[in-house]
Amino acid sequence: MAVIFLPALSSPLLVAVLVAVLSGVGGTRARRTREAITRFSWLAVLPAGMAAVFDAGDRHEIPWMLLGTSIRLDAVARPLVLMAVVLYGMALSFVVRSKAERPHVLTAFLLLCFTGNIAVFLADDLVTFYLAFAAMSFLGYAIVVHDRTPSARRAGAIYLVLTVFGECAVLAALLLLAADGVTTVGEAPAAVSASPAQGTIILLLLIGFGVKAGTVPLHVWLPLAHPAAPSPASAVLSGAMLKAGIVGWLRFLPLGEGTGEPTWGAVFLVLGLVGGLLAVPAGVLQRNPKVILAYSSISQMGFLTSVIGAALVAPALAPACIAAVVVYSVSHGLVKGALFLGVQAWDSERLPRWSVTAALAVASLALVGAPFTSGFIAKYVAKEAVGEVPVPWLPALGVADVLPWFGVGSTLLLARFAVTLARRERTPKPTARMRGIAWVALSVLAVVPVAALASAWAPPLSVPGWLDPSAIWAQTWPLLLGLAGAAIALGVTRRAPERSPTVPPGDIVVVEERAARIVLRGLTVASNGLGQVRGAVVARIAAGPNAGPGLDRAQRVIGTWSGSGAVIALALGGAVLVAVLAAVMVP
């Protein structure tokens, strides 16, 4: 492996280990040292950013590790690694003054998650990819349950169950590929396309990476994990870790191979469009701003799932769709991270209220896709990338005609987010000035790297002109329509805001938990009933006639010389009789 990647992957691990050692040592000096390391832990992610900027994109190998580890910084990995560096660095800087009771513990696990997260983006062989994906997924449990509250434990349990389920699906898919002789990530799409088990592999990939990407109906952990986790953890969960599932699809699905996968493309399109749009009413009926942002993430991941589905349907569009997914992922990661950190900035940061409001407003407009924001670029290139792919079973309706309605849904969700955030009480604490400036810059200036990335990928991407009237109107009408709907909803519910209808966070998981409890009670009743039946049968047998004395007498008779001789004689006679009958019957 090139020397440049050694500090990129080792620095976060070393800092996490150092924090753990100092936590076990005890004493005032160790505590102060640990606090200082926690405060400046964001520096540990900078080597990865340097590597992402200066690496030439060659394949780097470690032959002695496991079955041979390899990483590569390609056109997909580079912008995502840089996005993760910015997002994790900002989240780590927010840990110190967050509501987390053990900031050093949260810092250590965020650094470990960062290492696994960028390793997923960089991995170039199956073993490295799976180990990095699994490590990141299970370490995510630690940041979900960090506060150790009942809600955090419940969210962590559901997250862990779905993670194990997803990991098993991913492992099964990769084992099927390995059985066909695939060892590197680059070989996977063509191998999936040509595999006899193609349908099984795609289904496993859909499930396994769909859990991490928050695809409906595997999304239920997201609305539970975000309000339970501290804001810095929520920022990286939504901004960076969700993208590991998206990258899994980009790496392993047969995008651009053969004549396409119209059936599986239709499945992805339906899950993305239906799930992404249904996340809007479920999110609007929430009262916790972080839960609303979680449903917004589910909706945005549905948007990306739809673009990937279009690439499966039309292989010629795959290069543009892959580029659009990467651009959209970077935009969403930066903006959504800024919004989750903005909840902490609103609640407990001693920043001017106008600056927090302005930064949150710009980030919200970017998520909607308003003109002159990063979302304006990301949504435009995605809509252009899907071309004229029709909605499944509705050939007269194009996917590009449906995607703008995600902007309407995002506007409704973020309007509800603003209302719920405004109703929260603020308890401001001292804030590092430079850290606050960095957060405001992240919210406002995300458009710069996103625009540069989209321009570097054109073609195959079609980038809008900043002053193009048609592009501006195409991105403005969803915002205006969403604001009109939000104003109507606010007017209807203003008189009785506390009596407005709500949906439990996690929506269908509540039904699933109730069903599981009913099934468990049924199994318990059935088990108790079987136990009672068994007891009655045993008692009935014990009360009936005993065959033991008769068997004992027969055994004593056969056990004598005369008795055993009689048995042998009968057996020989029967054998002779059978032989004679067989000889007579033969013609």
Image (cartoon, rainbow, N blue to C red):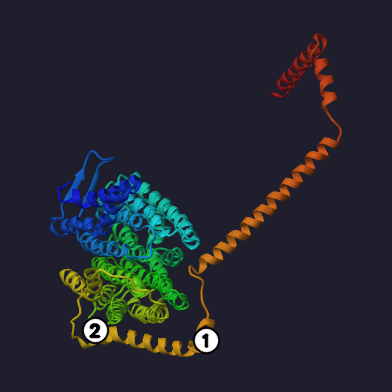
Q: Nearer the viewer, residue 267 or 10?
A: 10
Say which element carries label 1: loop
Is 105 left or right of 185, judged from the image as shown? right
Residue depicted at 44% across the width and 64% down the height: 228
Label at residue 91: none
Residue depicted at 28% across the width and 79% down the height: 352
Marks 1 and 2 sit apart, C-alpha to C-alpha, by 39 Å
Q: Quadrant of residue 323?
A: bottom left
Q: Quadrant of residue 367?
A: bottom left
Pinpoint residue 448: horizontal percent, then vertical percent.
18, 73
Pinpoint residue 344: horizontal percent, then vertical percent.
35, 70
Is 73 left or right of 302, judged from the image as shown? left
Residue depicted at 54% across the width and 66% down the height: 510
Pinpoint residue 186: horizontal percent, then vertical percent.
25, 53
Is residue 196 at all visible to an observer of this figure? no
Q: Quadrant of residue 262?
A: bottom left
| Three-letter code for the amino acid on which mark 1 is drawn | Ala
356 to 126, vertically: above or below: below
206 to 352, vertically: above or below: above
Q: Nearer the viewer, residue 510 or 421?
A: 421
Name, please, the residue furthest toward the top.
561
Q: Residues within 10 Å of mark 2 (few under 14, many from 20)?
A: some
Q: Which residue in the structure is indicated by mark 2?
A: 471
Who comes first in sequence, dot 1 or dot 2? 2
Say which element carries label 2: helix
Is 560 left or right of 505, judged from the image as shown? right
Q: Residues within 10 Å of mark 1 (few under 14, many from 20)?
A: few
Label at residue 496: 1
